[in-house]
Amino acid sequence: MLLVRRRAPVGGFFTDSDRAAGIFGVTGTGFAVFLAFVIFLSFESYDRARESASLEAVATTELFRVVQLFPDRPRVQLHGQLVCYARSVINHEWTTMQEQRESPIVQDWVVWLERTIEGIEIRNDKQGIAYEQWFDRAAERREGRRGRLAEAFPYVPAIVWAALILGGLLLLIYVCFFADRGERWLVQALMMAAVTVMVVSGLLLVRYLDRPYETASGGIKPSAMRSTLTVMESESERLGPQGSIPCDESGTRVVRR
């Protein structure tokens, strides 16, 4: 704006400033509506990511409690595997989601859980009811994880980003043509700064909402799963030996000899 101002005539480039301001108002309003619509959709995606992570954590807690009705050996195995699942989600999959992919370590624990539950021998009605409840809670856990992983991929397509950036640049260029040597330079600078701040902050907000699992402040953290892990580890100490947990603190499988 200050560079253009050096070559601008007194009174500005526009012979009819009211007409120019009207066109700018229409253009700015159109960009603002488009930006608001994209922010709204991005926020919905962000909210779905948070809800899916919470659903997965709650379902994992319920699975841990359902397991307590199973026979001793599979109960200890499933308790340990669920603890390892939670650890691997927190320490591995939250990192891989930033790269828009799932963690093979978490998927391995899912396979181990399925193998263990398939080998259980039901001995009474209580165990039969618990067995049915397991599959209901497992479906909820699976749905929560699926939703969480789905939201790791950018929600705003590239063509929408192109339209947003092009619209923002158009506004900034248009403002430059309001340069006027007759105005004080501070007034001109503030005019440009105000529009720039609004455009850039809007684009940054879309970028933030479109990548909900990044480590930046405000990103979704595995807080719900951490709470679940705390509960499971506490109950594991009470219900079974710590040696039954087949993984390290990060959730990586440990082969015991």
Image: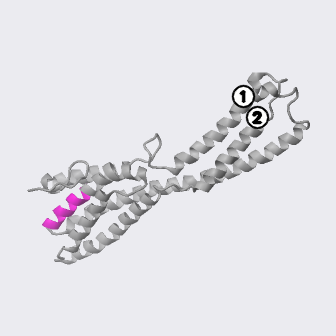
x, y (%) of residue 70?
19, 69
Q: Is residue 3 above or below residue 23?
A: above
The residue at the point 66 percent across, 52 percent down is 163
Please say which color scheme the image uses. Answer: one colour
Residue behind mark 1 = 190
At label 2, the amino acid type is Cys
Q: Position of residue 132 (x, y in %)?
A: 29, 74
Q: Secondary structure at mark 1?
A: helix
User: Most extreme residue toward the right, as rendered?
Assistant: 15
Q: Which quadrant is the C terminus positioned in?
A: bottom left
Residue shown at 18% from the left, 77% from the top: 124
For the N terminus, the image quarter is top right
Q: Amino acid at mark 1?
A: Leu
Q: Taking 147 as reference, is 136 left or right?
A: left
What's the magenta region?
Answer: 72-83
Residue at screen point 73% across, 42% down: 171
Residue 135 image position (x, y, % from top left): 31, 71
What secondary structure predominates along the stretch shown in magenta?
helix
- Per the rendering, the mark at residue 209 is none
- The answer to whether residue 28 is magenta is no
Dot 2 surroundings within 10 Å: few (below 14), some, or many (20 or more)?
many
In the rendered image, the vertical position of residue 184 relative to residue 125, given as above or below: above
Q: Of helix, strand and loop, which one carries label 2?
A: helix
| Snapshot quadrant of residue 113 | bottom left
Say which label, 2 or 1, has the lower sequence index: 2
Residue 79 in magenta stretch: yes
- Circle count: 2
Q: Around disc 1, counting alpha carbons within 10 Å, would you say few (fewer than 14), some (14 to 19), or many (20 or more)?
A: few
Name the residue rendered at 20%, 58% in the picture.
Answer: 80
To which residue does mark 2 refer? 176
Residue 121: x, y in percent? 17, 76
Q: CA distance from mark 2 to mark 1?
A: 12 Å
